[in-house]
Amino acid sequence: MGIKSGFRFALAVALLTAATVAAAQERASDDRWSGLNKCELSAFGGRLTASALCGTLSVPENPAEPAGRQLELAFAVLPARASTAEPDPVFFLAGGPGQSARDMLPLMRAPLNELNRERDLIFLDQRGTGGSNALECSFDEQGEMWLEPDWEELNRQLRDCLDEWDARVEFYTSTEAAADLDALREAYGFERINLIGGSYGTRLGQVYLRNHPGQVRSLVLDGVVPTRLALGAEHARMLDRALEKLFAECEADETCASAFPQLSEAFSDLKARYLDGGQDIVVTHPRTGSGIDMRFTRDQLAAALRFLAYGPESQMMIPYLVHEAARTGSPERLAAQAMIVTDRMNDMIAIGLNFSVGCSEDWPAWPQGIDQSGTLLGNSMTEIYEQVCAWWPAGDAPDDFHEPFDSDVPILLLSGELDPVTPPSYGNEAAAQFSNSAHLIANGRGHIVMTTPCMSGIVTQFVRQASVEDLDTECMDRLGHEPFFLDLLGPAP
């Protein structure tokens, strides 16, 4: 989720790093990775690729039955380019929950390129994702499912997928995933490791830190999920916050304010228009080109803006799209742009793992009696978890799962100012919890900020020194939001 922001940066260095990565793989034939096979991994529908070494790790599906059914977990490695690698590699933890870490390798190779000089980079697909018995569900008309949700139909299709999976989904939680990470660490003889997690990956990093504190050298949390948070319970309030800040940025920008006057009022009018009613529209599907009949309501407006709000570039389309929909009464372009984003996200998330984590860890801790009907997203997150978790085979989270804890491990916390799901306040909360931490807020950025060259450089410094002291953050003074789109031909010059 926030992935688009680093695409151009990743692509720019991809060719420069390919030769050195290949050389490192050749050199790996006589080191600890000699049993792995060369592989090609891709992202963004094949537009970005990377060579790596791939292997599998066998772990018990049920940790209480070590001799029982085994899972084959897929992982990939970018070996260090130095002749002698540092003894503490970097493990990357993907988001979601439900994202494949190996799918993220082609994108993260560029931001972590400098670290890869001296450290192996390891990408383990969490159980239930990617090549690790993925709990994927091919919904009928899946691109439209999230823009025009039919919760009864979603429930039915999820039940069908559950029947088809060869998995006991109650064992697909963060606790088991952390144990799998440690099994991989132990299998290759690493005494300590560095963890870099984004979004949900920040929760997994914290679970690993709590359960295996002696094995962590440093921890980077980008898009912080606080320990106490039931993930999803505050999405509605956080989306409203991000949109309000975005509209304020537009109003403070002379060009944007001139093109889209009284944007906040236009947005309020748009919300009110679809609060209790809807509009029949036809949207062109981004992949097939066919027309899709849709009833556009507040749910569709919320889904559209929510997914567009993740990335710093797609965020900049929102003022134009909101202004157009409010002025003309035609939300087709808003729905079409959102369909492009949701279509990509559907391909990235194993929805079964998402619910295994959510129903086991979050729904039992869901705050009771809250009413978010006044927000754009409303109570939809509560409604879907209430329906699915009523029958989903949930696992047992530890009693202290959401209890804050401290650690002497150095922790770098990163937030995007305009993040619609894990705002800077979450990073502040984690900074108050962890005594050996530093929190950096990237101005004008959305969800996940380490893909920008400035922030990736700071991450490199931090991991190399394993300390939050004396980090050179001067480049952050030049960070800001991307140029606003004045039309759909591209951003303003």
Image (tube, rainbow, N blue to C red):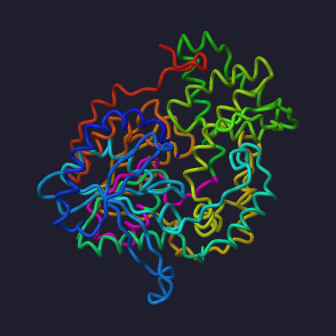
The residue under the point 80% across, 36% down is: 296
Question: Along the horizontal axis of the image, is 86 left or right of 124?
Answer: left
Q: Position of residue 50 (x, y in %)?
A: 35, 48
The residue under the point 55% across, 76% down is: 171
Rendered view: 169 above or below 441: below
Q: Position of residue 436 (x, y in %)?
A: 30, 55
Magenta residues, start to end: 205-233
Question: Along the horizontal axis of the image, is 103 left or right of 375?
Answer: left
Rendered view: 210 above or below 94: below
Q: Residue furthest right?
A: 277
Q: Position of residue 7 (x, y in %)?
A: 43, 36
Q: Position of residue 133 (x, y in %)?
A: 52, 69
Question: Along the horizontal axis of the image, is 68 left or right of 413?
Answer: right
Tell me, yes or no, if residue 362 can be seen here. Answer: no
In-front residue for pair 82/62: 82
Magenta stretch: residue 228 in it? yes
Rendered view: 89 above or below 249: below
In-front residue for pair 390/240: 390
Quarter of the rendering containing residue 337: top right
Question: Along the horizontal axis of the image, is 203 left or right of 242?
Answer: left
The residue under the point 71% across, 33% down is: 335
Magenta stretch: residue 256 in it? no
Tell me, yes or no, if residue 148 can be seen here. Answer: yes
Rendered view: 259 above or below 393: above
Image mark count: 0
Quarter of the rendering containing residue 160: bottom right
Q: Residue furthest left?
A: 83
